[in-house]
Amino acid sequence: MKDLSSLKDLGLETSDTIIIGVVVLAFILTVRAFGSYFARFNNNINDFFFSGQRFSWWLPAASMVATGIGSYSFLKYSEQGYNTGMSSTMTYMNDWFAVPFFVFGWLPIIYFSRIKSVPEYFERRFNTFARYIALVILLAYMFFYIGYNFFTLGLVFDELFGISQMYSIPIIGIFIGAYVTFGGQTAVIFTDLFQGIMLYVAGFIAVFAGIYALGGFTEWWGWLPESHRLPFVHLTDNPKFNTAGLFWGEALAGSIAFGFMNQGFLMRYLSIKSVDEGRKAAFFNVLVTLPVSAIIVGAVGWIAKSLIMKQAAEGGISGYESFQITDTFVTFLIVCWTTVKQNPWVFGFVLSALLAALMSTTDTLINACAAVGIYDLYKPLVKKDADDAHYLKAARWVSVVTTIIGMLLVVWFVNQDGSLMSIHYKGIMIIIPAIVTTIFLGAFWRNFTALAACVSMIVGSVVTVMSVWSPEWIDGLAAFVSGPQNGKYYYMRALFGMLLTGTVGVAVTLVQHWFFPKSVKDNLERSNGLTIDTLDKAMENYKDGIPNHEIGEKVYELNIQIDDSLEKNYVSMNAANLETLKAKDEDLVYIADSRWYLGGLRSNHVKVKLDNTLENQTIKMSKATHTEAYLLEGKKLNIEKIF
Amino acid sequence: MEQKKSLNLIVPALILFTLVFVYYFPRFLIDSLGEANPWTSYLYLYGFGGYFFMIGLLLITKTGSCKFGRGRDTKWFTILCSGFIALMTLHAVWIHLALSIPVKSGVN
């Protein structure tokens, strides 16, 4: 029986290593080619970061698959699946509680207000000081993730090929930095779509190979211990993975952080053509993408447990080499190598999925950091009124700098003790509670003031950091969570931080309103359109008119007639077509190339006008409108009303 | 004084109630079922989760962010509630199957 504590123990032949390397390299080059093609769809800075709010829901939703699964996910969740079983799905399947706040609150607020970043929201909702406090916290969050992804990729390369992180990380960093730098958000979305598909295919291969080795689904379930079958882990027992902590740390703080402040995800939602489509993407993400992803990243660990149990009971698995896992960190790779019967081509393909996971998460984060760098630092502080070409150039430089900082942060991660899971949550649970709570209060409580936002973010962040050295402060909230003192409060620190920030924020707001009403006199006016109860105003601003909510039907396969006398970003149609759309003069509509599989790549938002001289199924627009929507001559288009 | 009058007290009241709930609910569950019972974890998650989910529904309907009959709001609201029930049911069935189907190795 092989006792495997590292991949070096697999005893890969040189020829196997070369084949695996060739498959991985082929994958990298394919992704690079994909990214380069879509780099052409960047006319301006809005396209570079947000792809011009034009995509159908399924495109960003599908590309979010790859973004949501980091390189560490396969390793971390397979390890967790092996140790605690199907409860490894918990972090992926507990997001529903925050969905009402997102789909009816935060999403329409940022979309209709055309908010580019969370710090920008803080400036508009509160003041400049709040913006920069939020910026510091947000950058800490983003850089933490970028550094962590580079770090875990370096570990994989070290384990598998024996390539030092010193070399593997700069090479991968330069590669990712290059296509993000030149491609922008459109390249990121399309390469992530491709990588997401690859990731799912490779993940399913690993799962099916494992189930096949076991002799079928019933065998897998039958050999799985009861503790490993359960969807939830013990309420309090394991200090690093318990239901109580996961609820506060992951289901609330983590989900809100991912949905509300992860700039990468926000930019995906802001690239979608309408809020309605954004809701579709959000529901699809929580109901389909996340559960499937939970299976893809964790199932190999569950299979490993059944294999070990069956092997122990029956003395081996017929047709497969016996093995024992002593280092659970490499569970995914060891089980996969064994169950694909040491086939280097298949294994190389599965390994490419790990790479896809890393690249797709990191490219999104680099693009997101660049967006924050331009909109929150460069534009307001360095050069206010430059043209788009200048900002596009600056954005590319910021992407380069972001990549370099991310790579440098690996030095810090290398010096951290503990498992991948513990390093991850130790950092995240300190960074997010204060800002998550402040965003929440800002978006959902109109009376929440600028002073309260600043004070609560500073106090919340500082005290949460200090609780690392004084964990006894959290005792009152989490005394029943057992475990060693130093590892006790990974998750419950999030609850502590959120409650503290919330209490300070509410207290300061109430004191201001009750005792210093003059200090909050402009609060209501400033928050108009930026809170959940003022969304009607936000919609009016977005449309620059009164929204028309009547539901119409889409009109398909329209012929385009070019007429330069029509204003830019206006189209005209006859009364019959407008009636089908249930649209009136000046309503906001969305035009797109009729080929659905483009997902809105060639499309734009425009306003519609009545023109009864036009025939049915004909739409008129200027050449400028046609060009700006990336439409092609001779191709038909579809139109639908936004509101 | 105008500001004081218009100040909405629902949020502070909810936060106060939440603090009390956060403190007593887990203790009630542990006293009733024990920490190791799989249903304790289930009820903890859906108890607290359900509480926040309900606050979310209350908030979006009371503030007018979700208006029944406007656009597709009713449809989204229905999906929202159905999704919650579906996930809650899925997890309950999952626990039931995990506990009721015998394990081949006899190891629990």
Image (spheres, coloured by chain):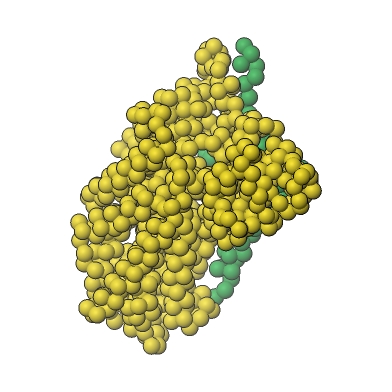
Q: Which residue is pictured at 34% across the width and 64% down the height?
A: A28
Residue A99 visible, this angle: no
State the residue in front, A575 or A57: A575
- Quadrant of the image for the N terminus of chain A? bottom left
B20 lies above or below A337: above
The answer to whether residue A46 is left or right of residue A609 is left
Q: Residue A316, position in %: x, y?
A: 37, 85
Which residue is found at the position 51% from the left and 36% from the top?
A115
Judging by colour alone, the chain drawn in green in this rendered image is B
* For residue A49, side relative to residue A280 (left or right): left
Q: Residue at 56% across / 15% down in the picture? A: A521
Q: Using the image as rendered, state which of residue A200 and residue A77 is in the foreground.
A: A200
**Taking B15 as reference, is B58 left or right?**
right
- Measured as percent of width and height from the top left, residue B88 is found at 62, 56
Q: Is residue A511 above or below residue A101?
A: above
Residue at 64% x, 55% y is: A637
Labels in figure, total: 0
- The residue most toward the bottom is A319
Please tell me the colour of chain A.
yellow
Decide: is B27 above or below A129: below
Q: Quadrant of the C terminus of chain A?
A: top right
Q: Nearer the viewer, residue B2 or A116?
A: A116
Q: Residue A386, can we see it?
A: yes
**On the picture, is A611 further left or further right than A604?**
right
